[in-house]
Image (tube, rainbow, N blue to C red):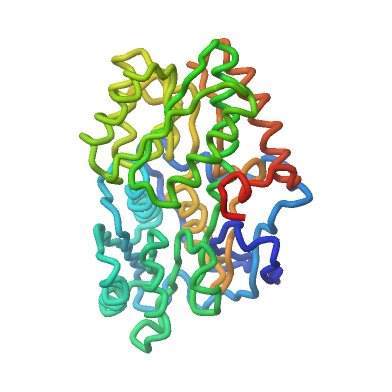
Amino acid sequence: MRIQKFSAACVAAAVLATAGCGSSDEPEAKSVDGPDPFAVARGETIGEPGTATAEQWQGDGSVPKGQPDMNGDGEVSVGVITSGDTNDGTYYQSTADAVAYAADQYGWKHTVQGLVPLTQAVTAAENLCRQRVDLIVIGDAQLSQAVTAASNPLCKETFFYLQGGYGSPKQDSTFTQSYDVGLDYAYVAGVGMGAYMKANDIEKTGFLAGIAAPFNTTIGKVFKAGVTSQVPDAEVVETYTGDQIDVGKAVEGFNAQVSQGIGAVYPYFGAPTIAVAKKAKESGIPVLGSPKAFCDSSDGDFIGEVVFAPGYYLAPMLDLFADGELELGVTRNWRLGVDPVPAVRACDSAGDGKDAMSQAIEQAQADVNDGKIDLFGLAGVS
């Protein structure tokens, strides 16, 4: 399959990799006990692209010989490195869970290394190559330097996959990457929250995140713009705890927001999300949950979910790898409102506000995909 090359309009879109070359040696999937935690991500497209929607695939790639047994040793092994805690219950764990699920399904071996220092990214990848893994999953963009190990002769029989490359490093033939546009779902999440607030006469909501750095503050700004698009006089209380993983600080920040009179909250975290949701439930505060699917969770009163954890993007790619169809040297854009994930959805527990949320979310997604919303302007980075 020939993939379209990068275009300027897609610099801020999303990136991953797969392909369409069939294999006569496809592995037989095993039955796996329990429901598929990533089933939502394996479906077909859910909507039509808009005039400003990025292409689904970008780059000219090819399927390496022998995939998935890249080194021909008779077994398939996958190695994961990530900068975060793979037991966080949400963001980083999703990658480990996706690999574990695929390994169970297809009879692969796998190893996971979390909390890898940024300065050790390349070394960690090279060490996996020494272990003769067939696929290296680089779980987050902070470790993107690890893809340079793909040029090491030691790694010549290893497929490199980078989650969330953000266009850096520049795509080449040595790796495949995925990408989504965080500002898209930040805005639509805000619209959904605003619609819920409007339906329930809530005037103030909270946005709670970790470090006050652009990767959080731009999301906060765009979320606020989404809220006020529905409730112009709404107040969004933004709190940055200074730590991405400290549960205590997150709960402390939430308590401070409650004292300021918030009527709903969007915790934009990994591990602290669940702790905040539980505390919010005690306080009777509805929660917009992220980064995984939360509508069926009893950890909080979830009125909606914003699904963008990397495991959801990785799971379908592992299926392609198993089938010998994952192209090397391409990027995969995951488009809100077009692909199954990322996703912003209202939960049944939103009650009377569910329909209003769903309608507002659908319209906002269409507006984003048609380029009607200047997201980078709203984020202050245009």
Image quarter in which the N terminus is found:
bottom right
Residue 375 drawn at (x, y percent): 63, 46
Q: Percent x, y for residue 154?
A: 33, 86
Say which residue appears at 35% left-offset and 40% top-offset: 240
Does residue 232 appear left or right of residue 117 in this picture?
A: right
Q: Is residue 276 left or right of residue 263?
A: left
Q: Residue at x 73, y 47 (%)?
A: 371
Residue 117, quarter of the rendered image: bottom left
Q: Quadrant of residue 280?
A: top left
182 relative to 261, above or below: below
Please say whether residue 290 is visible from this viewpoint. Answer: yes
Quarter location, residue 271: top left
123 vs 212: above or below:
below
Q: Is residue 26 visible?
A: no
Residue 175 against residue 82 in the figure, above or below: below
Q: Residue at x 36, y 66 (%)?
A: 143
